[in-house]
Image (cartoon, rainbow, N blue to C red):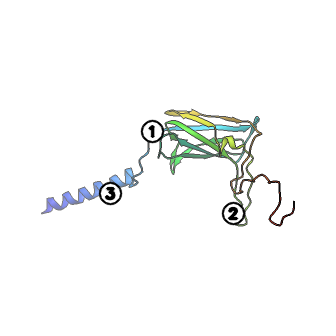
Amino acid sequence: MGGSRAWAVSLFCGGLLGLVLFGCNSEKIPGLGQVTGVVTMDGKPVPEATLVFTPAEAGATASFGQTDGTGKYELYYSRGHKGAKVGEHSVTINNFRDTGEGGQGSKETIPAKYNAKTELKATVKRGANKIDFDLKGGGEILQPNEEPSSPKKKGRSATGCM
């Protein structure tokens, strides 16, 4: 009976050690590449911009990053895991900040071709990746929290006036 108890204690301790060493998180992390870079627009750093790298593979998890005051960013796949899934990605960059409840917000200043209607693509490889984005100003800018303005129709209004 003593051997059986010792075996059970050993099994329990081994399981506990496994949880401590490997964690109990069932999140499956794909092959990641570390991604850093700089975002500029017309040659000037873009501070406080959010980057999202969305893998081309359907259902794959996106990675996120934020630029600092000099436009530098680093991507994060999930808590405690830096990088992005290896492969092709669609990239969005925006600097809109919602005002929220009494908070300070900011309007989007980055053209839609880099966010809502992104044309940006990037390939992430295993290991270190330096992916810089030199954006060009001008073009359509969409504000996420505003309805698109519709063109005014000429003609009579509901009251019959022009």
Residue at coordinates 23% horizontally, 60% vertically from top-left? 9
Mark-to-mark CA distance, 1 and 2: 36 Å
Three-letter amino acid code of the residue under disc 2: Gly
Image quarter where the N terminus lies is bottom left
Residue 50 at what x, y percent from top left?
65, 47
State how many labels appear: 3
Location of mark 3 (residue): 16
Amino acid marked by disc 3? Leu
Q: Secondary structure at mark 1?
A: loop
Q: Disc 3 versus disc 1: distance between alpha carbons?
A: 27 Å
Per the rendering, the mark at residue 31 is: 1
- Residue 153, image quadrant: bottom right
Which residue is at the far right?
Answer: 162
Quadrant of residue 104 within the rendered picture: bottom right
As drawn, 6 above or below 92 = below
| Residue 106 position (above or below residue 86) | below
Q: Nearer the viewer, residue 38 or 4?
A: 38
**Residue 142, image x and y in percent?**
71, 49
Residue at 60% over, 38% down: 36
The spot of residue 108 in percent (x, y) is 73, 50
Mark closer to the chain start, 1 or 2: 1
In the image, residue 126 sits, relative to residue 149, either above or below, namely: above
Q: Secondary structure at mark 3?
A: helix
Question: Counting other residues with Cα less than 10 Å from the Cα at mark 3, is it few (<14), some (14-19), or many (20 or more)?
Answer: few
